[in-house]
């Protein structure tokens, strides 16, 4: 019972870390990355479709993303979706491919992005603490129902806290790495 609770908490905390990595990948750093386009969906015959399902995405150089749609008639919809997104980028096309130049970030924009990364990290810390809270409640309930002893309860609560500390430290490492990437000129 205790092992199941701790394993469940660990899996949920790992999912928080994975989610944070996905969120951080979609934040612009001044270098071209196709992960920037992960959350953008364009209208494809009336259906919102992720860009990676309707085009080939590539980064031929660090300042450019090239989107080559399988159906060239979707280029206007792709451009419209990019312009409507929060990326702040302007696409160009030559009738066959959409080019998305990634301009260097200004100092002010770098600071805004670094602050946004801090918010993402805090959301994930809160999620990890919520997992800890849920696991602690389960352990305390087991003790209250006399299914485990008080010593087992204390040991389990300590293990859950150690797990929480480890995962929050991992969030902090990811945060520092992404902030350094953003603030690097």
Image (cartoon, grey):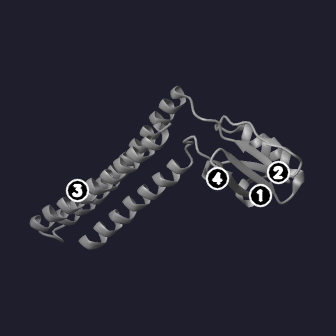
Query: Residue 27 at what x, y percent from top left?
Result: 55, 44
Residue that carries the numbered disc 3 in the rendered image: 161
Q: Which mark is residue 97?
A: 2
**In the rendered image, the vertical position of residue 35 relative to residue 30, given as above or below:** below
- Labels 3 and 2: the sequence-earlier one: 2
Which is more toward the observer, 68 or 162? 68
Residue that carries the numbered disc 1 in the rendered image: 55
Pointer 3 with pointer 1, Cβ within 8 A: no
Q: Which type of secondary structure does the marked residue at label 3 adopt?
A: helix
**In the rendered image, the vertical position of residue 166 relative to residue 119, given as above or below:** below
**In the rendered image, the vertical position of residue 48 relative to residue 70, given as above or below:** above
In the image: residue 24, left or right of residue 127? right
Q: Nearer the viewer, mark 4 or mark 3?
A: 4
Residue at the limit of the structure toward the top, as seen here = 108
Say few, some or many: other residues with alpha carbon within 10 Å of mark 4 (under 14 / 14 to 19 / 20 or more).
some
Say few, some or many: other residues with alpha carbon within 10 Å of mark 3 (under 14 / 14 to 19 / 20 or more).
some
Q: Nearer the viewer, mark 2 or mark 1?
A: 2
Residue that carries the numbered disc 4 in the rendered image: 34
Q: In whole angstroms, how far apart are the C-alphas of marks 4 and 1? A: 12 Å
User: Residue at the spot x=72%, y=37% of the render?
Assistant: 84
User: Residue at the spot x=68%, y=39% of the render?
Assistant: 85
Query: Residue 175 at what x, y percent from top left?
Result: 40, 45
User: Residue at the spot x=71%, y=56% of the render?
Assistant: 57
- Labels 3 and 1: the sequence-earlier one: 1
In the image: residue 58, left or right of residue 159? right
Q: Nearer the viewer, mark 3 or mark 2?
A: 2
In the image: residue 65, left or right of residue 27? right
Q: In whole angstroms, how far apart are the C-alphas of marks 4 and 2? A: 15 Å
- Work out whether residue 1 can be spotted: no
Pointer 3 with pointer 2, Cβ within 8 A: no
- Labels 4 and 1: the sequence-earlier one: 4
Q: In whole angstroms, how far apart are the C-alphas of marks 3 and 2? A: 51 Å
């Amino acid at each position: 019972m205790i092992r199941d609770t701790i394993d469940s908490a660990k899996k949920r905390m790992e999912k928080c870390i994975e989610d944070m990595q996905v969120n951080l990948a979609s934040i612009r750093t001044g270098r071209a990355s196709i992960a920037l386009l992960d959350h953008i969906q364009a209208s494809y015959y009336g259906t919102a479709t992720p860009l990676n399902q309707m085009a080939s995405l590539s980064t031929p150089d660090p300042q450019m993303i090239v989107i080559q749609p399988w159906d060239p008639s979707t280029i206007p919809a792709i451009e419209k979706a990019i312009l409507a997104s929060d990326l702040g980028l302007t696409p160009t096309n030559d009738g066959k491919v959409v080019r998305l130049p990634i301009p260097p970030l200004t100092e002010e924009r770098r600071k805004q992005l670094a602050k946004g990364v801090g918010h993402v990290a805090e959301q994930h810390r809160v999620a990890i603490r919520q997992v800890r809270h849920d696991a602690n409640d389960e352990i305390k309930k087991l003790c209250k129902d006399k299914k485990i002893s008080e010593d087992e309860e204390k040991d389990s609560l300590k293990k859950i806290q150690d797990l929480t500390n480890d995962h929050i430290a991992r969030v902090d490492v990811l945060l520092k790495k992404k902030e350094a990437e953003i603030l690097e000129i």
